[in-house]
Amino acid sequence: MDAFFDISPLWNPLWGWAMAFTVALCAGMVKGVVGFAMPTVMIAGLSTMMPPELALAGLILPTLATNLWQALRQGTRAAIASIAHFRVFLIAGGLVMVCAAQLVPVLPPSVMLLFIGPLITLYAASTLLGRGLRLPPEPGIKGEAGMGALAGLFGGLSGIWGPPTVAMLIARGTEKTEQMRVQGVIYGLGALVLLGAHIGSGVLRAETLPLSAAMVVPALLGIWIGFRLQDRFDQATFRKITLWVLLIAGLNLIRRGVMLL
């Protein structure tokens, strides 16, 4: 329980918890506006005040809770319809992710980060300039399976499947409500896998569970605020904001890859 009361050696407990709650609140707001990037914001913010393993534990439950809310915001029936609509993408991505994960021990992390980072950055920048990739709304079984496999490859090798998924949805011209719901479904399923994996790994245990549970409330407050803001945006504004966040995410992946060289 020490992790619950004193989460940072650099801050007194009160300020440490205040900063951690602020990070969770901001991460939830970003997710509420664009539907992704919450783990990135939380791991970056929490890692400045606590060990990386504790930061990872801290984001597990709020990530699961916010993804469930995002996926089910229009109801269970709408979420099931989105799963059915993108089933080929989900199945192909899941299968490739499992296979690609087996390559992690033999591939330097920097290789995948420096592969996916420039691609995501280039896609976001070119689309903001009006020259981005455009895909048909219904690319067919082969096209959707290929996009799912690509996202699964990135996810299996680097643990990062958010940016490729968002890029695919934007390129297909997905309406913002459905895009948010599909992202919630995809990331929610991933969050369940993450929960199980880190209960097994020992990252989420009796000492770290209170921290993760405590982060749920500010994260839910943040995503509620983000949803309220996002509801005010039209499709064009939502798309532009998403692309800017995607551009920042791509640049951050490049930064991480360079630091690992």
Image (cartoon, rainbow, N blue to C red):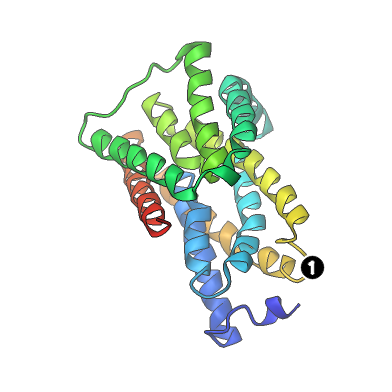
Task: Name the image quarter holding the N terminus.
Answer: bottom right
Q: Residue at x 56, y 74 (%)?
A: 50
Q: Position of residue 57 (x, y in %)?
A: 65, 62
Total number of numbered discs in the rendering: 1
Residue 172 in the image: above or below residue 33 = above
Left or right side of 102 for 117:
left
Q: Position of residue 2 (x, y in %)?
A: 72, 80
Q: Residues within 10 Å of mark 1 (few under 14, many from 20)?
A: few
Q: Nearer the viewer, residue 215 or 4?
A: 4
Left or right side of 28 for 240:
left
Image quadrant of residue 8? bottom right
Left or right side of 225 for 118:
left
Q: Is residue 212 visible?
A: yes
Q: Residue furthest bottom?
A: 12
Q: Residue at x 72, y 49 (%)?
A: 197
Image quadrant of residue 106? top right
Residue 64 in the image: above or below residue 1 = above
Q: Is residue 216 visible?
A: no
Q: Which residue has dot 1 on it?
A: 206
Q: Position of residue 219 (x, y in %)?
A: 57, 60
Q: Residue furthest front?
A: 106
Q: Amino acid at mark 1?
A: Ala
Secondary structure under badge 1? loop
